Amino acid sequence: MAGLLSLALVTTVMISTLRRWLARYDARAKAALDGLAIRNRLQDDALEDRERGLLARESVLERREYIANIRIAGLAKRLDEAHNDLAQQKAKVESLKADYQEVTTDYNALIEQVLRDGHERFTRHAEGLALLKLPAAVEARRPIQHRRASSSSVVLFQPRQRQESV
């Protein structure tokens, strides 16, 4: 019986030592698991914060992209309008240049006619003056005048009368 008692005592001591060791091990394991759980929760919170930040930045970028697309569309429209206006202005300038050229040609012809009429009005038509026949190109531009028989002749110079000095 003494052997049984000592065996029971050794068994009880071993069981109690084993229980203490298991309790400490469980406490350490539980503390480690609690630490891991806390760290995991903190990481999950950090990931959620990062995800919220990324979603917020993504929505901001989407809004900026939408606004940029609207601006680009507006700029493209204004560029097309400006290009069309420029084409219209160029056509208008060409038309005005043609009109100006026509008016200038008419004005020059009118001035030429006024000068010829003035020349004929203030020129003496005497016999024996040196007359020169105008080239055909000048005659074609010059309107027909009915006041003189030889309308294609222009007086280039008149003979001078000499005055004798005393």
Image (cartoon, rainbow, N blue to C red):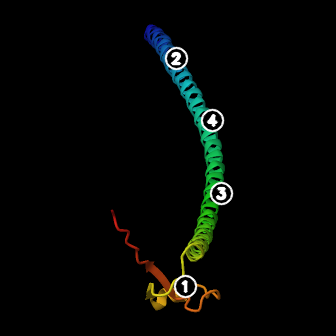
- Confirm or deny contact between disc 1 and disc 3 (CB under 8 A): no
Q: Which mark is residue 38?
A: none
Residue 120: image quadrant is bottom right
**Amino acid type, residue under disc 4 in the picture:** Ala
CA gap between label 3 and label 4 equals 31 Å
Q: Residue 49: where, in percent of width, then height?
A: 59, 29
Location of the C terminus (image quadrant): bottom left
Q: Residue 56 carries which label?
A: 4
Q: Which of marks 2 and 3 is in front?
A: 3
In the foreground, 36 or 153 = 153
Q: Nearer the viewer, mark 1 or mark 3?
A: 1
User: What residue did someone put label 3 on?
Assistant: 77
Q: Residue 39: where, in percent of width, then height?
A: 52, 23
Q: Which of marks 3 and 4 is in front?
A: 3
Q: Which of the two labelled residues, at mark 2 and mark 3, occupies the earlier sequence position?
A: 2
User: What residue did someone put label 1 on?
Assistant: 141
Q: Residue 31 carries which label?
A: 2
CA gap between label 2 and label 1 equals 117 Å
Q: Residues within 10 Å of mark 1 (few under 14, many from 20)?
A: few
Element class at badge 1: helix
Seen as rendered, the residue at the extreme left is 166
